[in-house]
Amino acid sequence: MNKKKWLSATVISSFLIGSILTGCSSGEESGSESSNGKTVVEMSGWGASPEEQELLEETLASFEEEHPDIDVEFQTISDQYMDVMKTRLIGGEAADVFYLDASEAPGLMSKGVLEPLDEYVTDDFDVDDFEQPLVDAFKQDGRTYGFPKDFSTLALFYNKKAFKEAGLSGPPKTMEELREYAKKLTVDEDGDGKPEQYGLGLAKELARQFYKLDAYGAKLVDKDGNAAFASNEAIEALQPVVDQYRKDKTSALPSDVGAGWGGEMFGQGEAAMVIEGNWAVPFLENNFADLEFGTAEVPMIKGEQATAAFPVAYVMNKESKKKDAAWELISYLTGKEGMKIWTSKGFALPTRKSVAEELGYADDEIRGALVEGASYAQPWQAGENLPTISNNFDNQFTSALLGEQPLEKALKKAEDTANQEISAGN
């Protein structure tokens, strides 16, 4: 086990200190007990909006009220979260409990730094209540290393006014329909080839494209964790994206219209449709209050429902000296009561089916499509080499979109370069 490969010496020296926010406890920063004799459980996570921070504090306060012998000290790591966490794990300074994104989970699970949680689980925890793909994202070799606290899938956001003006009564059901709808929704009134409104806002990153591969029989990585996305099947899956952008000219990147991301592009009326996650909902509601929009499940691909999922879990540090108390915290936060508080405002979606139903998200006009996708979603992860694979894909796929090289050549170059870098790092 060579933990030092995780990050460079520069990262180790630069990010040893994360900013700290003391949550709902008055306990000391370290040690097994606070001044009042309670067990102190340290928990680390990334920063959040003031509204989300308030919800977290409310959830932790509820936990402490039900567990009067435990104090929780929450530490916010504001920048370079995973670099800081890896450094602290290497140095034996990591918190007892911390957030872990699904994309980073394979790497930590394989390093032996996370505590398997299966032996802590009791019948009343109700593991079957979780959406299966979301909890599976934190399993390896038959062991469960985390339980998901929240998630988002991707869904189709569409402008109701634009649809009405184009004579479209509802969202497209298939990717083929999506492409045809985009043609009808693209508005170029002055005929200069630069539409005032594009049919679709396009996200070029692998994280927004990978879920399309499976329906074509394509793979992102092989069994050894190497890049494997340059197959004929992958080209077939992704060529329509390139063709729509280059030939149809009915889709556009946010940068094409001066927007920072798809949600902004959609809110500004530059695109009549985008495929985005739950994070777009509060953004649109807060910044574009007059926008009438709806959501639908991502259009089917070759007759199959498909979408991406981005779950985050609570995990336990293998070296924690307070594992029983740490599990009490994890089980509460990912249990029905704690999850209900945390997800009550809709900033994050509950990973438990019962909580989604109780809070009304399963039938919600906007969030219902995002919740529905959880049962069949593909979590955003692909082994330990995902950062290398993703970076090379993004660079070359962008080149193909810009017409600098054919898609086939772009994917082959990305795959070869990624695998060279993976081989050099082993």
Image: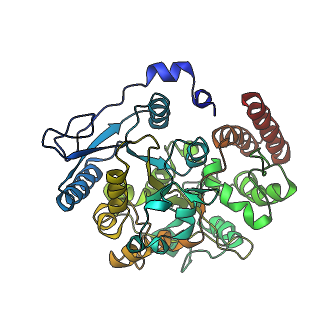
Direction left: furthest residue = 36
Q: Position of residue 329 (x, y in %)?
A: 32, 55
Q: Residue at x 58, y 31 (%)?
A: 3
Residue 404 in sight: no
Identify the residue shown where x is 35% and y is 42%. Answer: 47
- Residue at position x 19%, y 53% in the image: 69
Left or right: 152 in relation to 36: right
Q: Position of residue 40 (x, y in %)?
A: 25, 44
Where is residue 197 shown, x and y percent of the image? 55, 57
Residue at 56% across, 77% down:
168
Locate residue 307, reporting x and y percent.
60, 65
Q: Is residue 388 above or below residue 362?
A: above
Q: Relative to 119, is 415 above or below? A: above
Q: Is residue 141 left or right of residue 129?
A: right
Q: Which part of the image, by quadrant, shows the N terminus?
A: top right
Quadrant of the drawing holding the C terminus? top right
7 sits left or right of 63 in the view: right
Q: Is residue 24 visible?
A: yes
Q: Is residue 408 above or below residue 141?
A: above
Q: Nearer the viewer, residue 238 or 184?
A: 238
User: Between residues 41 and 364, which one lies in front from this camera angle?
Assistant: 41
Q: Quadrant of residue 233?
A: bottom right
Query: Which is more toward the observer, 61 or 195?
Result: 61
Q: Is residue 299 left or right of residue 52?
A: right
